[in-house]
Amino acid sequence: MDNLIISCITVLLSSIFLFLQSNATSTYNVLSFGAKPNGQTDATQTFLKAWSAACSSMQPATIYVPRGRYLLKAATFRGPCQNRITVRIDGTLVAPLDYWAIGNSGYWLLFIQVNGISVIGGNLDAKGAAFWACRKSGNNCPVGARSITFNWANDVVISGLLSINSQLTHIVINSCNNVMVRKVRTIAPDQSPNTDGIHVQSSTGVTIIDSRFKTGDDCISIGPGTRNLWMENILCGPGHGVSIGSLARNYEEDGVQNVTLVYSIFTGSDNGLRIKSWARSSTGFVTNINYRNIVMKYVDNPIIIDQNYCPNKQDCPGETSGVKISQVTYENIQGTSTTPVAMKFDCSPSNPCKGIQIKDIKLTHMNKKAQSFCKNVQGSKKGLIFPDSCI
């Protein structure tokens, strides 16, 4: 009996040891690698050294960034790594005042070919104002940098991050799978060019929830090859709305499918729910798109499909769009439009929009009935439609 009890205890202790071992994590504090939290000393190499140590760890690893300001130039955090990594940021990462320091790279912070990466908390300050001024002046400027980019990464979590004044797009998700974005905020002036909040392309299984975007471009932009994108409780404005596209930049282009936006509010944005494509030949398509339970507060174009997209009316292709748009549902969209036309469907004559469904729409302009515009669109309506449907 004693031997049996001893054997049971031994098995139990071994199990506890294995459990603790499997859940153990290694923590790498950037201060231990020489980072100075004064916002003036270049911390780029110390962060890369911390990344190298975490990436080679056989155990799950945490890179910890304590409170303070850390000056970072363009940095690439490359995988694959031995195990999952959490970057926990309690401080602020700041870019150099000289916009050329990151502007020529195209990226400020780049995570590439990393599986199981989480970025938790923290502030990013890209100091983009001088770069925008350079572009506005017409002087010789760098291409610009996106603040934080994930390329070819899987099982990604971005939570509690604040990004301000990005030179270009704040957050890019490219060629990724299984991504969770939650409680993220992006802030840039409404006239700051190309400062999209989040850009998603060539990615599958992305979720964006409980997030707020104030930008000079799209709050969320959705590019070719995006599949199974879920967006919920999004606050957008100022900005250019939630946009699929622009598409048809290239002839050979992957489609966009299974995109859902629910329980969201647009305030003072240029657009609300937008699908846009250039008027040129394309193999692209947009299908199974669902917008439900959306509030518009003084939005310029609450609902718009524009297949003649050509910003500034320069170098317009002058063709017809080859992008096939189908099975798009708008349900319970309410609020106010700052322009008379609250619903605009300007579809391609060679590829009319098909399966456009509108249900329970109530949009007004200056406390009066708004208008709708339809061109080359087929679909159906159900419930109360205000303005009067032209479908």
Image (cartoon, rainbow, N blue to C red):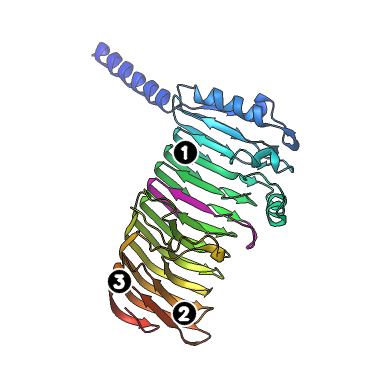
User: Which amino acid is tagged 1?
Assistant: Asn
Front residue of this view, candidates 182 and 41: 41
Magenta stretch, residue numbers: 188-209
Q: Distance between the residues labelled 3 and 2?
A: 18 Å
The magenta stretch spans residue 114:
no
User: Which amino acid is tagged 2?
Assistant: Val
Which numbered circle lies on residue 230? none
What residue is pinned by disc 1?
Answer: 151
Residue 64: x percent and y percent?
A: 59, 33
Front position among marks 3 and 2: 2
What residue is pinned by disc 2?
Answer: 341
Q: Which residue is drawn at 42% across and 25% down?
A: 20
Front position among marks 2 and 1: 2
Residue 30: x percent and y percent?
A: 63, 29
Q: Can residue 7 be seen in this view?
A: yes
Task: Tell whether label 1 touches label 2 (CB within 8 Å).
Answer: no
Q: Which residue is drawn at 36% across and 54% down?
A: 282
Front residue of this view, candidates 13 and 198: 198
User: Height in image: 314 above or below 375?
Assistant: above
Task: Say which label, 3 or 2, has the lower sequence index.
Answer: 2
Quarter placement of the C terminus = bottom left
User: Which amino acid is tagged 3?
Assistant: Gln
